Image (cartoon, coloured by chain):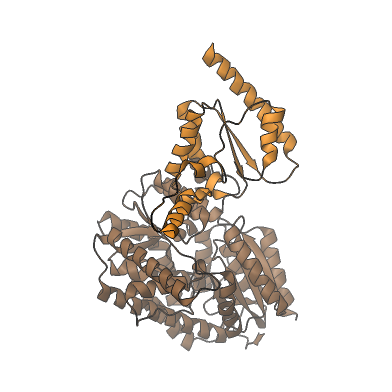
Amino acid sequence: MADGDRRLMSLIEVDMGARVVAEDHCTGISSYYRQTPTSDDPFADLAAAYLDQAPCARQNPISERVDFSLELARDYRADAVVYAYLKFCPCYGMTKAIYFDRLKQLGIPVLELDLDYSKNDVGQIKTRLEAFFEVARKNKELRHA
Amino acid sequence: MLRLPIAPNTAKQTADPTNQLEYIEDSRTQHAYSPAVQELFDLAVEYISWADGQASERKKAVWTQGVFEAPLFYACDTIPVSAIDLGRLSSGKSVEIAESAFDLPKETCTMISVLLGEWVRKGYPHLKRIAAFNNACEPFNMAYELVGTLGYDIHRVEGVVRPKHADPETLERMVAFLASELSDTARWLIGADVNEARMRLEIDRANRVQERMRRIAALRVKNPLYVKSLPMMFLLMGMGHYFGRPERFEAVQDKVITELCEASFIVPRGHHAIVPLTWIGARGLEFGVYKAVDDAGGALLGWYTPNPYDKTWRTDVPPLESMARFILDYFLATSPVRQIEGIERLVQGSGSQGIFFYTYIGCAFGGVHVEIFREYFQKLGLPSIGLDGTFQVGMPSGQLLTRVRAFVEMLQKK
């Protein structure tokens, strides 16, 4: 999900009654999954940390990024994934199909939302979320039946 | 504005072209008097299929950007196959193929999607290696990620960005880092260190090519339409890779110079004056824009594109360092503010009365730079127009062409 667009979180949690269990986005949880080295050279340690932990998706190969997202989905037992990205962001926009293929293999439903910071698409997003969560809930019930 | 003697225009009038190859054919007809231009187009049109054929015969050929890699690649006996040029002469269905194969968002830069579409469409079983210079834009870097899933072997060349203000020590560290990346690239290409003596010869060649291009640019100022905009654009692109055949490209440059020296003036039909102009930004796939400029009585005499011709490769330092310094002085690796001085030289040298700023729709990289340039030249009182183009095969939009024509006409009336 693109950072800064908190209205989506509100739509998911307040309006839809769903819970976001993990956030993997530009300033999400990924930075906290790594440790900063503590050698005798603090500048080198910081440089290494920044290279590994930089929040932008451009910093890591796509395979690592997808693996990490899927690991989160598994660890937090996510029932569904909302794949939200900002229009014109190639790092998430162009590579979405790779994510979708891997999520499909795991049987996790995914909703794609291309967003910007405008407010005029809230109604449309809400409608799509409603439909998506309805299907996701049904799938979950079927799995547990 | 240049006032030129009226000379008969003997070029045959043809129906409007509808795709890139037809634009080239149209330009061939317009340049029927020039064997050099015919040979240039032969080289350009054959380039990718010729390189593919060489690769199928086990010659080394590797995809790359095709802008400044020539000395390193040729020193490694490797044909640089320009990924950008693959897109430039692509199929009309490339964008559709890429969108379908990778589910690309609609706003994806068309330069990238046609390229991906071509890689998917043709597969290139003999051309499966890509030297990916990270100094390219982000969509390009993502395209490498995507094409990697199709079995292409991607070698990343990490780039550095020269800041607006860099102290000499920092700059030297950047040069050393980049030179080490280039050294790694040579090892990836041939499994050994680059032969420095050989690379020095290739740097000499690159300097000869640059020098000839400056000569051609200067001769065009005196006789602007003998070599019109489209072949000029191909001459510029060829500087980056020589279309795989360095000796032939050098020979074409020499022929162009000879012809320009001996040619009589060519003026467009119906116009008694030519408006000298500068083109800044992407080189574009919309050949119709170049044709519209020429037909309206304009002449693109200054070019600030990914193929700079005002630069020289240093010969007093080791060749990999020379290449690193060339790249760090190159516009893709430096702040747009640092580039303005070079652009100003081009504008003045060509006597330009106006500027075209050309970017691809959705290209944040070029779009932001162009706005900085535009503001600067606006303050100097030099008219300019921004063109948002695409990399799709076909004719430019009517709106784009109308804007081009209106801009040239406005300058003619000044």
Q: With B366 as the anchor, is B125 left or right in this view?
A: left
**Residue A94, x across and y down, in percent:** 53, 46
Taking the spot 51% from the left edge, 81% from the top edge, the residue there is B217
Evaluate whether residue B60 shows in this view. no
Evaluate whether residue B381 shows in this view. yes
Taking the spot 28% from the left edge, 66% from the top edge, the residue there is B76
Q: Which quarter of the image is occupied by the C terminus of chain B?
A: bottom right
- On screen, residue B266 above or below B126: below
Q: With B257 as the anchor, is B3 left or right in this view?
A: right
- On screen, residue A46 above or below A75: below
Q: With A124 as the anchor, is B105 left or right in this view?
A: left
**Residue A128, x across and y down, in percent:** 67, 31
The furthest residue to the top: A145
Q: Compare residues B273 and A16 and report the one nearer the observer.
A: A16
Residue B222: quarter of image: bottom right
The furthest residue to the front: A40
Q: Compare residues B380 and A23 and report the one nearer the observer.
A: A23
**Residue B140, x across and y down, in percent:** 49, 55
- On screen, residue B140 above or below A19: below
Chain coloured orange: A
Q: Compare residues B308 and B123 and report the one nearer the observer.
A: B308
**Residue A102, x across and y down, in percent:** 46, 33
Residue B368: quarter of image: bottom right
Q: Chain B appears in which tint?
A: brown
Q: Which quarter of the image is occupied by the N terminus of chain B?
A: bottom right
Tag count: 0
